[in-house]
Image: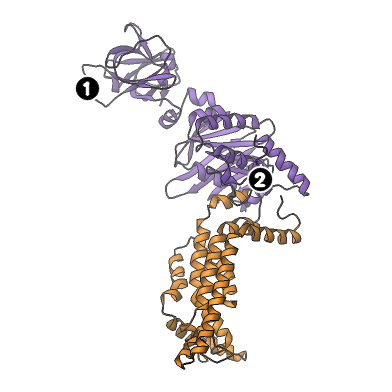
Chain colours: A purple, B orange
């Protein structure tokens, strides 16, 4: 179990956070330049936090009050760098062997072979890093990080330079790493899909702070604020004000959609009338319907269709006599390519926002 | 030759410290290091002469110990060191700064101590730069003239270096001696540059020897 509570001031941002990794993969999700790498470097002991403490399995690694600061050499942490940071002048075998603590050469050799086998790169031992593909290099880096039996593995966006098939393959292998590696894993990424696949819990990170840290289902279901919603893929966000509330429902007036539009929300947790809220919905939950009889339905013009591999994205502009949107406000809908709807660019359709799929952010 | 050896170690040591030194004084210190290269060698010689002369504090200290540096053979070495140090320093420091700090950090998280990191990771990676700096510094100290003449004088058999001897031979009209000395210089320079070029290219071999020597002392320094 890794317990972290640290503060450090930088010129661009201040790190001030607290979290626990307890025999799991914790994913730190944040945009680039938000201080994720610096946080990992603090934990590994490569830079020294200003204050706080870091504890690993009951052992104190850093404590500003007690003046404890173990060197990175003594922390037993595996670090995977974004650029792999292999030793370019050494063969794969030498790279992996450098961190091994075993006494005899025979044992060390055995361990290197075992690690390369586990990483699915047996037989590459005598090559130099420059002779390997980027995927193979990352496998070597992982084997090297595992070589001194770390208690924690720190991943700093390790797969971001790989192409999609290689990335997916490595993600799969990382999940099966848990079969023989019993330790905590801290995985930093800016990619929600990747984080969701790998992590059991997700920590949403914004300029040095963790704004939400929860079970991944919870994080996706109910983001706590605007940044959290954006990062977790809630593309449609609308500002509004609560007009009334009744049993299990609230009515929200959405200013962006003009005064007539009222949206119903089924999750009722201590909202009050006239409270300013943001309503969010994922693009895949928007529905094209035949008429405007159901609640939360309004007319939209399809102004652009973007075709993906397996889905279609529709950029929608609401039609409202009282409001001139002209490039100011859009909604995005996302549908499978294989639905039998025939939506044509430039035409108008009724759009329904299912009340149960709406997220309220205060 | 001795000057080259001194520069080799001093250059590596100081460049290593400076390449990781973040302070604001860095530019100032580097400026002072580079001075001997910018100043005319005669000026460097004059400064050394003043610093080590019998009336200066250092000179007094030395004469209290019963020695003097001025116009002695160590003076030729000191002059050569001062003049060629900037070349060694700047190339070596550049080579150290080129190394991705992540690589050294990776070694740290693997549990390698700083000493081992320096010899197994940093030095091999900076090797081409270090070797190039050594070649340059050696060439510069071999050809050193102005500062040597000012600081060490030209006492045959004691402080007479080849370039100075050539100059005085030509002045005295002794063309045979000059030609002889020039030939010797050419041979020494050519051989040493060849050796150093070879040395630079053969780094893996040299370093594996280094590793081997190390592993004899500390069991299991380096495997595979």
Q: Secondary structure at mark 1?
A: loop
Q: Position of residue A7 (x, y in %)?
A: 51, 46
Q: Quadrant of residue A315?
A: top left
Depth check, front residue: A47 or A63: A47
Chain letter of the residue beneath label 1 in the structure image: A
Q: Residues within 10 Å of mark 1 (few under 14, many from 20)?
A: few
Q: Which mark is residue A324?
A: 1
Q: Name the mark nearer the viewer: 2 or 1.
A: 2
Residue A64 is at least partly visible in this image: no
Question: Between marks 2 and 1, how big is the CA–CA gap?
Answer: 67 Å
Residue at image location 56% in from the left, 59% down from the top:
B126
Q: Position of residue B22 (x, y in %)?
A: 48, 60
Depth check, front residue: A203 or A188: A188
Q: Residues within 10 Å of mark 2 (few under 14, many from 20)?
A: few
Chain letter of the residue beneath label 2 in the structure image: A
- Identify the residue position indicated by label 2 in the image: A126
Q: Quadrant of residue A247?
A: top left
Depth check, front residue: A198 or B202: B202
Image quadrant occupied by the N terminus of chain B = bottom right
């Amino acid at each position: 179990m890794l317990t972290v509570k640290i503060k450090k001031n930088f010129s661009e941002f201040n790190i001030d956070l607290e979290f626990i990794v307890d025999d799991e993969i914790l994913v730190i999700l944040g945009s680039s330049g938000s201080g994720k790498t610096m946080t990992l470097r603090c934990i590994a002991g490569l830079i020294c936090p200003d204050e706080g403490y870091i504890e690993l399995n009951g052992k104190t690694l850093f404590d500003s009050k007690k003046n404890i600061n173990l060197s990175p050499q003594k922390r037993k942490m595996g670090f995977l760098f974004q650029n792999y940071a292999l030793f370019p002048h050494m063969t794969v075998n030498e790279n992996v062997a450098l961190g091994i603590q075993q006494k005899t050469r025979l044992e060390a050799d055995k361990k290197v072979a075992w690690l390369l086998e586990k990483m699915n790169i047996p037989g590459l031992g005598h090559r130099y890093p420059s002779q390997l593909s980027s995927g193979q290099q990352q496998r070597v880096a992982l084997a090297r990080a595992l070589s001194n039996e770390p208690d924690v593995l720190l991943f700093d966006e390790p797969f971001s330079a790989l192409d999609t098939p290689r990335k997916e393959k490595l993600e799969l292998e990382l999940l099966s790493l848990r079969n023989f590696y019993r330790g905590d894993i801290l995985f930093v990424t800016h990619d929600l899909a990747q984080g969701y696949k790998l992590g059991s819990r997700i920590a949403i990170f914004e300029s040095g702070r963790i704004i939400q840290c929860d079970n991944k289902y919870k994080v996706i279901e109910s983001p706590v604020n605007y940044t959290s919603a954006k990062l977790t893929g809630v593309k449609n966000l609308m500002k509004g004000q609560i007009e009334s509330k009744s049993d299990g429902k609230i009515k929200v007036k959405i200013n962006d959609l003009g005064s007539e539009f009222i949206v119903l929300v089924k999750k009722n947790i201590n909202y009050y009338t006239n409270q300013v809220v943001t309503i969010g919905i994922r693009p895949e939950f928007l529905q094209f319907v035949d008429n405007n009889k159901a609640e939360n339905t309004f007319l939209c013009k399809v102004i652009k269709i973007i075709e993906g591999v397996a889905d279609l994205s529709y950029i929608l502009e609401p039609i409202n006599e009282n409001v001139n949107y002209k490039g100011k406000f859009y909604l995005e809908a996302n549908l499978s390519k294989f639905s039998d709807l025939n939506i044509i660019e430039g035409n108008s359709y009724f759009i329904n926002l299912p009340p149960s799929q709406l997220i309220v952010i205060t | 030759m001795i000057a080259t050896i001194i520069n080799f170690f001093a250059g590596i040591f100081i460049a290593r410290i400076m390449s990781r030194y973040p302070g604001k004084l860095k530019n100032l210190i580097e400026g002072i290091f580079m001075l001997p290269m910018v100043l005319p060698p005669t000026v460097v010689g004059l400064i050394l002469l003043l610093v080590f002369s019998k009336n200066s504090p250092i000179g007094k200290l030395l004469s209290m110990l019963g020695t003097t540096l001025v116009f002695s053979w160590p003076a030729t070495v000191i002059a050569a060191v001062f003049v060629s140090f900037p070349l060694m320093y700047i190339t070596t420091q550049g080579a150290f700064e080129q190394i991705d700090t992540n690589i050294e950090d990776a070694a740290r998280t693997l549990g390698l101590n700083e000493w081992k990191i320096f010899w197994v990771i940093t030095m091999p990676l900076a090797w081409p730069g270090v070797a190039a700096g050594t070649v340059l510094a050696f060439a510069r100290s071999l050809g050193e003239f102005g500062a040597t003449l000012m600081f060490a004088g030209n006492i045959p058999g004691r402080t007479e270096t080849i370039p100075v001897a050539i100059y005085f031979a030509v002045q005295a009209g002794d063309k045979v001696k000059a030609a002889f000395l020039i030939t010797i210089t050419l041979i020494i320079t050519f051989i040493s540059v060849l050796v150093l070029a070879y040395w630079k290219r053969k780094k893996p071999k040299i370093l594996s020897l280094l590793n081997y020597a190390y592993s004899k002392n500390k069991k299991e320094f380096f495997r595979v």
